[in-house]
Amino acid sequence: MHTHLTVSPDVAEALRENRPVVALESTIVTHGMPWPRNVETARLVESDIRDAGATPATIAILDGKICVGLDDATLEGLGQATGVMKLSRADLAFALAMKRTGSTTVAATMIAAHLAGIKVFATGGIGGVHRGAETTFDVSADLDELAVTPVAVVAAGAKAILDVPKTLEYLETRGVPVVAYQTDDFPAFWSRSSGLPAPLRLDETSDIANTFATRQGLGLAGGMLIANPVPVEAEIPASDMSPMIDQALAEANKASIKAKDVTPFVLGRIFEISEGRSLETNIALVRNNARLAAEIAIALISNK
């Protein structure tokens, strides 16, 4: 095992016995949702994965180790911690070397999952090309990670606060397969459709698993993005979301909020503007993605 890796007993046993495991990020706990809903949601998501027949592996950086699988007390502590670093590829090694506490973004979670031998990861939405990137060059490291690290990521599309058309273009340029699950539309996080067609569509988890395995068999670098739309009953239509997003982004710009701080600020403001509705949708889509990821992880085991 990698020297910087600590794997919980239940996750280690599942991997050893070739049983399905689903990785989960921790940024949603530290930066994505307010206390106590963050920890409540993390527990619900883990429970959803177990109920679907897989083992959850929430990932965080603690005491100089990449912890894969967190116990209840650790998750609780992380949910209330302050000064937690939001880690991606660029600062993961720094946090480990300096023994800092850190939560993992999509990119960092993919790296950790791959080191641990986990092939499937469920999140809310990936990062992407930020609006105005033609002048700021603000592009999430998540996109390049999808191009180099062989993990299948289940998300409700890219976060709708981003430039979704440019995000899709960037993923295509980097050779990342973007597969929408049971829809022709690329979803936009809180909304079932971004108004853009999905590059690829698959309706069966067995086909998703087969595509991922075939890609690995070809020796192609990188992972795969499975875009899973939010359940109909939890959706906030794009027409409702758009003015809220515009207002929150304008406020972030006025306050000169940059880089990694943009997304947590904007999500927080949208929560306030929507009077909590956005959080309920966020929770619903994360749980929906976790259930699908578990099914894909099971199908990957069956595919061998």
Image (cartoon, rainbow, N blue to C red):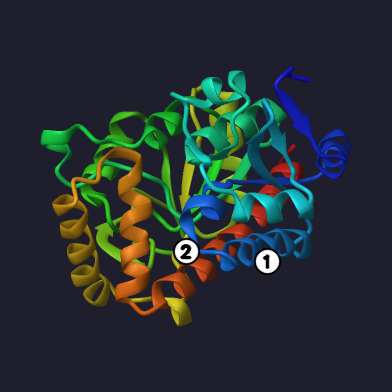
Considering every residue shown, the one lying at the far bottom of the view is 233
> Which residue has dot 1 on it?
44
Considering every residue shown, the one lying at the far front of the view is 82
* Residue nearest the observer in this picture, 47 or 251: 251
Which residue is rendered at x = 47% and y = 25% of the image?
91
> Looking at the rendered structure, which numbered label has been put on residue 99?
none
Image position of 289 with respect to 150: above or below: below
The quadrant in which the C terminus is found is: top right
Residue 8 placement (x, y as % from top left): 82, 39
Which residue is rendered at x = 77% and y = 59% of the image?
50
> Which residue has dot 2 on it?
182
Residue 134 placement (x, y as % from top left): 12, 36
* Residue type pointed to by label 1: Leu
Which residue is rendered at x = 45% and y = 72% of the image?
281
Which residue is rendered at x = 64% and y = 59% of the image?
42
* Residue nearest the observer in this picture, 23 or 136: 136
Image position of 271 with respect to 76: above or below: below
Are the two marked residues, 2 and 1, in contact with CB atoms closer than 8 angstroms? no
Query: Which secondary structure lies at badge 2?
Result: loop
Residue 202 placement (x, y as % from top left): 49, 55
User: Hey, which quadrant is residue 90 in on the image?
Assistant: top left
